[in-house]
């Protein structure tokens, strides 16, 4: 049986992480081909055949229609039995291009259902998804939203660190006493990541609680200058680190991670930080509500206001026992690659049997 994985580009994200895992593990039993339409930044090792299909080499209105013909023609010649597509635009492109061809299609969503602001595109997406054989999402909230899809399942993004961090996965792996007084945030400096909210929240925290802590933000983006100016105006001493290639070194040092996103379907950094025994604080995104347990292994703000986030930060800073317990209660078992590929194999088996 041949399985084809289709993604717009191979950059550095959660969808690409799943592509790497599926291509590696499924190639042990099936013929695997991965197709991408744009760039490959070579962050991940893709197993099996890797094909760049340039569907955007024509300009203007013609390109909007010719891309469907190119996708259809290639898939027709490749003859896959099952196609797994990643991200909404690619899902829609492939579903339209393969209409009436007979392949089984599994579409996957890696952003929250409400992130797509355009009502027109939302209707196109929702209509298209009625024709996929299965849809994989990252949270119960998204599964409930897509209840009109014939088969919808929750399968999380894998935590690759778990393969190499057996020690860290136990409470013995990281010496908490050796952690630095570092509050860390990791993510692109874009509006959806909520850093303006975060800086305003920090401004509300008692300066005596923050005086011994360094605050660092790892990430690059279009909002950087605005955020640096805001930090200055709020008299906050924040180190903007830019893009960090090996963020693991920061997780090793950090005591606390704050994820202030306005929307996250999952939030990979929450699990990455947990692997290094970092106490986690998050806004109440779909991803945080799905993978964190409030007051057990993390604190989740009650809403998206600076006040609510500042209260969580203040509580962790002022209560060492709480901070320690949030770390001790971390359990990453369900995010291991072995568990994730098991769920994928089961889903593929169901479709194969139909």
Image (cartoon, grey):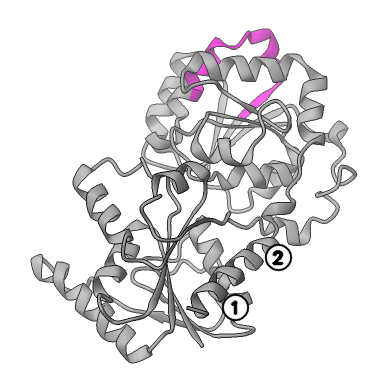
Q: Which residue is more in the foreground, 313 or 82?
A: 82
Residue annotated with mark 1: 26
Residue annotated with mark 2: 338
Q: Which residue is more in the foreground, 236 or 300?
A: 300
Is 207 contained in the magenta span?
yes
Q: Which residue is more in the foreground, 268 or 73?
A: 73
Going 63% across and 8% down the picture, which residue do you hit? 206
Residue 296 to residue 117: above or below: above
Residue 80 to residue 175: above or below: below
Tag 1 and tag 2, C-beta contact below 8 Å: no
To which quarter of the image does residue 317 belong?
A: top right
Q: Which residue is more in the foreground, 287 or 104?
A: 104
Q: Dot 2 surroundings within 10 Å: few (below 14), some, or many (20 or more)? A: some
Residue 258 to residue 343: above or below: above
To which quarter of the image does residue 311 belong?
A: top right
Q: Is residue 279 left or right of residue 108?
A: right
Is residue 16 visible in the rendered image? The answer is: yes
Q: Which residues are magenta?
A: 198-215
Residue 209 to residue 49: above or below: above
């Amino acid at each position: 049986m041949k399985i084809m994985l289709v993604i717009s580009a191979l950059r550095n994200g959660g969808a690409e992480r799943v592509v790497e895992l599926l291509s590696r593990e499924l190639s042990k039993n099936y013929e695997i081909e991965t197709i991408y339409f744009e760039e490959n930044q070579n962050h991940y090792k893709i197993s099996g055949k890797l094909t760049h299909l340039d569907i955007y080499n024509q300009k203007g209105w013609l390109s909007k229609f010719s891309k469907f013909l190119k996708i259809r023609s290639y898939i027709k010649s490749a003859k896959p039995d099952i196609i797994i597509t990643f991200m909404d635009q690619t899902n829609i492109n492939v579903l339209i291009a393969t209409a009436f061809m007979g392949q089984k299609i599994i579409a996957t969503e890696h952003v929250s259902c409400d992130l797509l602001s355009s009502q027109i595109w939302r209707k196109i997406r929702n209509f298209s998804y009625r024709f996929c054989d299965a849809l994989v999402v990252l949270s119960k909230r998204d599964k409930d939203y897509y209840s009109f899809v014939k088969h919808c399942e929750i399968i999380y993004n894998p935590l690759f660190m778990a393969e190499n961090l057996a020690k860290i996965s136990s409470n013995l792996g990281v010496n908490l006493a050796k952690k630095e007084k570092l509050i860390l945030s990791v993510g692109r400096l874009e509006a959806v990541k909520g850093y303006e909210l975060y800086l305003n929240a920090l401004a509300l925290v008692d300066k005596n609680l923050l005086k011994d802590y360094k605050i660092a933000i790892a990430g690059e983006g279009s909002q950087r200058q605005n955020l640096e100016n805001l930090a200055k105006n709020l008299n906050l001493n924040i180190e903007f680190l830019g893009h960090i290639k090996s963020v693991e070194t920061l997780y090793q040092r950090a005591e606390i991670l704050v994820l202030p996103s306005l929307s996250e379907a999952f939030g990979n950094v929450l699990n990455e930080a947990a692997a290094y025994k970092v106490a986690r604080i998050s806004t109440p995104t779909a991803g945080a509500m799905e993978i964190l347990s409030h007051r057990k292994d993390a604190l989740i703000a009650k809403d998206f206001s600076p006040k609510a986030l500042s209260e969580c930060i203040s509580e962790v800073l002022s209560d060492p026992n709480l901070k320690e317990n949030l770390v001790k209660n971390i359990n990453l078992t369900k995010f291991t690659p072995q568990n994730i590929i098991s769920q994928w194999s089961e889903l593929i088996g169901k479709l194969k049997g139909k």
